[in-house]
Image (cartoon, coloured by chain):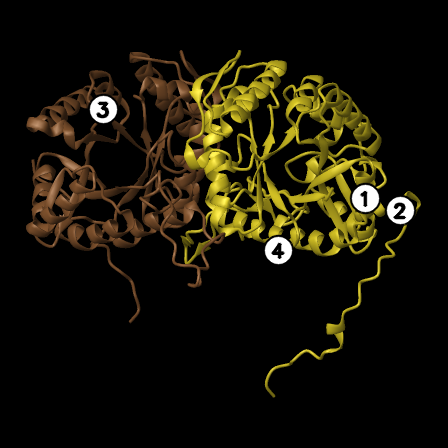
Chain colours: A brown, B yellow
Amino acid sequence: MTAGPVRFLVTLPSRGDGTRGDWGPPPAAPPSFVTDLRPGAYGPFDHLAQAGRAAEIVGFHGALAPYDPGGEESLVVTAGLLRASRWLRGVAGLHPAAATPVYAAKVSASLQRFSAGRLDWRLAVDLDPSVARAQGDFVEGADRYARADEFLTIAKGVWGEESYTYEGRFFQVLAGGFQAPLGSSAFPRVQLTGTSPDALELSARHADLHVFDHEDDRDGGLDALIAGLTERAAEQGRTVEYGLTLPVLAREDTAEAADEAARRAAAGAPPAALTGSYEDVAGALRGLAARGVTTFVLEAAPHIEETYRLGEHLLPLLDAPDTTREHAHAD
Amino acid sequence: MPIDIYWRIGTHGDQRSLRRRVASRGDFDPGVPGAITPGVRGGRGDGYSHLDHMADVARASELSGFVGGLLPSFPFTDDPWAAAASLARETTTYRFMIAYQPGFLHPVQAARMSASLQRATGGRVVYNVISGGGGPAQLWWGDKVDHDDRYARTSEFLDVLKGVWDGGPFDYEGRFYRVEGAGLPGPLAGQPFPEIYFSGSSPAAIRAAGRHADYYLSWLEPFDALAGKFGQVREHSAELGRAPRFAVRIDVLARETEEEAWEEIRRGWRHVDPAQLRGPAESGDSVGWLRSSSFVDWPVTDFRELEAAPNVWGGFHLLRGGPAFGLVGSYAQVAARLDELIGLGVDAFILAGVPHLEEAYRVGERVLPLLRGHDLRVNDLPSGGQRDRAASPGSSLASIPVPRGNA
């Protein structure tokens, strides 16, 4: 398989970032004789907004606002992100029990209109049962995938047709469907995840991008997963692109990266899946791209600094179309 | 108690005026010459969307003295949650009154969206809870729950939303919703709870409003009918130990003189489809809509026949999309009618006028300063047929010559 252009997404910090945002301990304040104009002037979304802006400025393809019942709500985050950017795609995490498919599509149609079509969906299907019940969702097992299938079928149905009827087990709609101009934008690109047969079958039917986790590639398991889903999708007459979620730690050289990894391990931070020099990491990503991965969902903290670092040092080493765009600036 | 005055935002485009029923702002009527947001430059789209115009209306509203605006939700409109979340960071004091139907979001999801939006706006979210107009539109949304059950669901929805708001853990088992160990996480918990403007004219609505409404919101009706409706809500609420405030949604067409205001209506009237003058068509199971059309003797031939009470005109739906009744008159007359409503117990207004951007400034600058609120004595009111006697306030700036540029 020949490696084509690759795309990079960042994951937004839905639960703050260390002392930034109000999710962790408050930052150390300067002593009281130092003028500090911040109190009362800034809120939690100022940090999130800057994390999104960083991704926009340095040339990431998109930013993921995950569906996180323990964090900031993803549609609100994504709407703000899209409004404050020109290029970036906003990936909004959604759960099929959170809204009816008609309403989820309706909100999304507006976000598409407001952002010139830069909205994607990341559908969360498989929640921990106690988390699901706290969201009011008591559907379990394979039914969750059946419901997700209905959710996506109806959402696409009302988007694409002016009169659409569907009677499902979980949802229904009678003579629904968007009038122009609501459905005139493209339907959000659908991202799905998971490795179970149910998850892969759902992706075969609906995903534009299936995102595996780096842990799925233990013992080279990614190749079989990709081959399997490609085959299932072909049975549906479809093709699916592949993504990979990947915590990275990249520095000027291998030794510096190893030092930083040791420092983080001592501080109790989880290890990155890929640690090394910019060239090391780029090489590993090229290898994954040659195996069929087109999209890397990178995770790196602290978000703003690491987004700049990856955008300036790592992305230029790869054939990422978003970093090679022409800048029209007047000198 | 201060009076809160909101100004609507069109989530379905806007007309240039009431004279022609064509939405040239926003892309809802394609191919209109001179259309903006999106506009066309050099043969290509200019990259603006209807949201950019909505942003202008929101900023005009906050600058001209309104506390915020209602963002309506219908099958054909843009969505209020999407618009509010998009505009959160480019407004300062503007309160987003988000219209939504409880059945379409799970209450825990609605709580999460609301709390994040409260954090993004510094607590500027207000709810307009609507329980649906029924009929084909309700099925369009994928909602088969019938009229009275929709209000029961609304009640449960708000119970769950309030139950998780401060962090929980909250358990609930109702007819429509069930949650276990629910609650908003860490910093999302305990944000200021949005004020609830509750709509609905049926007995089921009034019962549900008694439990949950901070403001009971009605379309404008002739004032005696409105007073009767408020009386019923007061009664039901008192049984539950609550005392809701009242809000009225009113279109306003105010001009320097009464004649100018009616002339504007007359210009729009020329383009009304005569078929519409036979009477309103049946639509869904909305009791508010049925009430509204009962105040006029259909069919009508002349626009003044729709003036159900002095300055209270029931033909706005013929000139633009939306409810029928609004106020038409001079600045002073319209202010006086609003004062009368304050006298009847109204605590908040959602005003609107076409086009929303320019009329926000007009009403904010010319009508709101004339309000006298509870200080008003009823015999001070100008009558419907009287000429406007309001004098413009003097200004010391008037004596400073205007610079004319370089000689």
Position of the N terminus of chain B, as image quadrant, is top right
Circle 1 is placed at which residue position?
Answer: B339
Residue B294 visible to the viewer: no
Three-letter code for the amino acid on which mark 4 is drawn: Leu
> How many residues crowd mark 1 within 10 Å: few (<14), some (14–19), many (20+)?
many
Spot occupied by residue B132 in the image (x, y as percentages of width and height): 59, 23
Three-letter code for the amino acid on which mark 3 is drawn: Gly
- Labels 4 and 2 positioned on one and the same chain: yes
- Please determine whether, in this image, residue A22 is positioned above or below residue B167: below
Circle 4 is placed at which residue position?
Answer: B63
Using the numbered discs, state the Cα–Cα distance from disc 1 to disc 3 in whole angstroms: 61 Å
Find numbered disc 3 in the image and state the secondary structure of the residue it sits on.
loop
Spot occupied by residue B22 in the image (x, y as percentages of width and height): 60, 44
Find numbered disc 4 in the image and state the secondary structure of the residue it sits on.
helix
Find numbered disc 1 in the image and state the secondary structure of the residue it sits on.
helix
Circle 3 is placed at which residue position?
Answer: A194
Mark closer to the chain start, 4 or 2: 4
